[in-house]
Amino acid sequence: MNISDIALKIENLRVHYKVYRGILKVLDGISLEVKRGEKIGLVGETGCGKTTTLKTVMNILARNAIVTAGKIHANGDIVLEVKEGRVRKKPPKGVAMVFQDPTAALNPVFTIGEQLELVIKYAANINENTREFAINALQSARLPDPERLLTNFPFQLSGGMRQRVCIAMALAARPSIILADEPTTNLDVTIQDQVLKLIKRLSDEQKLALVLVTHSLGVARETCDRIYVMYAGTIVEVADSNEIFEQPLHPYTRGLLASLPRLTGERMAEGIKGRIPDYLNPPAGCRFAPRCDHAFEKCYTEKPLFYKANDSHLVACFLYEEGFSGKSGEQS
Amino acid sequence: MKAVLEVRGLKKYFATSKKGVYVKAVDGIDFEVYKGDVFALVGESGSGKSTTAYTVMGMYEPTAGKIFYRGQDISKIHWKRPMELKKEIQIVFQDPGTSLNPSKTVAQIVGAPIVLHKKPRGEKLKEAVVHFLNMVELPSEYLYKLPRDIGGGEKQLIAIARALASGPSFVVLDEPTSALDVSIQAKIIRTLLRLKEELELTYLFITHDLSLVRNISNRIAIMYLGKIVEQGPTVDIFAQPAHPYTQMLLSSIPVVTKAEEALKPKKVTSTGEIPSPVNVPPGCSFHTRCPFAWDLCKQVEPVNYQISTGRWVKCHLYSNKEVLVKKETEHER
């Protein structure tokens, strides 16, 4: 594949956090790849490193974070590289981020118009007619009465409208990649549905590459083309979004899917026993091994590689070391 | 059958800084919860579901209307309620991170209601606490831990143990799993359902998660802007959602299988946002977002129409039989 088809590429990213108790080894070799115009979902539970991954790309990691390995390309530029123990970082171009909490993402003492025009001036380098660009940006996010909205303060808007303003603001910078960090977690289901449709429509229209971070498998399925499932700082499974729900392979993905309450009213499974490991002393082998029903000796000592089920379906689990035929029967 | 909890015309208004302007959090709702029920109160944020729960608990005094517990009038604030009654009705809050006192040990937290209601001392108290911890499948090692030393799921189990410690027969669950991850949620829900069978409890379950409700409740009331717009048996509502708002809610749920996709209503898509409960739209409060709304909806508030046994809908679409028949055939198609 030609390198220019790839919008964002993360290779073997390791990020640690230095805290009072020691070093938290959070990201343990994350690799992912987003093509131009592709929508991918990064799914995982609280504390699995989804947000850390996005923050590394945006170069907005907390001060106590240490990048120990990895390389990130965005739009053909090298954004981050670790060479001989030294980290080279630069802010990415053409990448915008939508944050989880729109109330915290907007400045409460400036009007929407002022904030939006700043983005247009400094991120998109447009110095004339910024007001018209701002109105256009708000219109594209289907916000009613954009002229009046420009003079409003964030507190005058509802949660769903604030998040739409944040999306408009992210898109006003004319990015080619959009990183959305749980954009709908704080919203009600009916508003979530509208915001997701908006994100989907805008990224289709403008051929944006989208990385949608979410803890909800349903949200990822309805928005994304491909899904990366994360567990405790590692990627455990990658597949097309239809396939991962019909044929989940990794024990974690299966456990997660079985724990979801279904509209059809099937019985929910017991959930997954135990909890996410302590990052101070993460398991030496597969990080899921202590919670896994299928774990055997090797799982505790060696890290699993990715095994290929088909061209687009990869799974990091020793169960599939000897092929996929025998084991896939287990899931029923 | 006699209802365990009966709510009649309950209203709870909150005053605002402007005189004569009220937030109509709960605006005239009726429902009954029978013994052994898991009665789910579903709605978006701002629909008044938590206010209803807190009014039932006596944390708020109702503005108007009556609440009966086994025939006894309990529509008053908690300090006016008798002790035996408080023992009977307990609550589990949404976020165990804030509902447990951070400076008290698990033994003190779970022990507090036992001391208050049953008054055992010393070893007996400790035994009782261990008994309730075992009930939620936590080992006795947890006795001297502080909330900060335990994970979110276990904290919620402790909040459940505390609610059970006074020996209630009616438990209000206010979004008990919405702050937790799905893999943990499943365990909490399993525990709650097991305890319901073992202790013959009745639950009032407050939530916004319809897929969860489908799995655990037997009756549902859907709330919108302080009013119940639809109520009935869970199976019926999911098979044939009647109110346009119920259809909108169902169609917005992100699902993971094709079988679930097929259950979602197709004709109603989500538009607009829930208006502020200070300025409730006149007529049917949902008319601003309703795809079927006509002139009547903007002027006259619909009453409750019964469409089948135990099933009520607050919508003008069901005001005469003809419309109903038409709607039903549409659903069949």
Image (cartoon, rainbow, N blue to C red):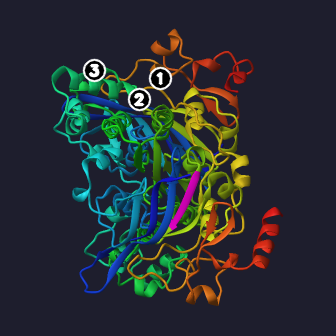
**Discs 1 and 2 lie in a common subunit:** yes
Who's the residue at 30% across and 58% down the image? B58
Residue placed under numbered mark 2 in the picture: A275
Residue type at numbered disc 3: Glu
Q: Chain of mark 1?
A: A
- Disc 1 on helix, strand or loop? helix
Q: Give the vertical position of A33 relative to A306 (above or below).
A: below
Residue B279 in view of the camera: yes
Q: CA distance from mark 3 to mark 2?
A: 17 Å
Residue drawn at x 72%, y 68% is B267
The Cα–Cα distance between marks 1 and 2, rounded to whole angstroms, is 7 Å
Choose between B21 and A178: the one closer to the eye: B21
Q: Is residue B54 magenta?
A: no
Measuring from the top left, give residue B183's x and y in whole percent: 49, 36
Q: Which residue is mark 1?
A: A291
Q: Do discs 3 and 2 belong to a common subunit?
A: no
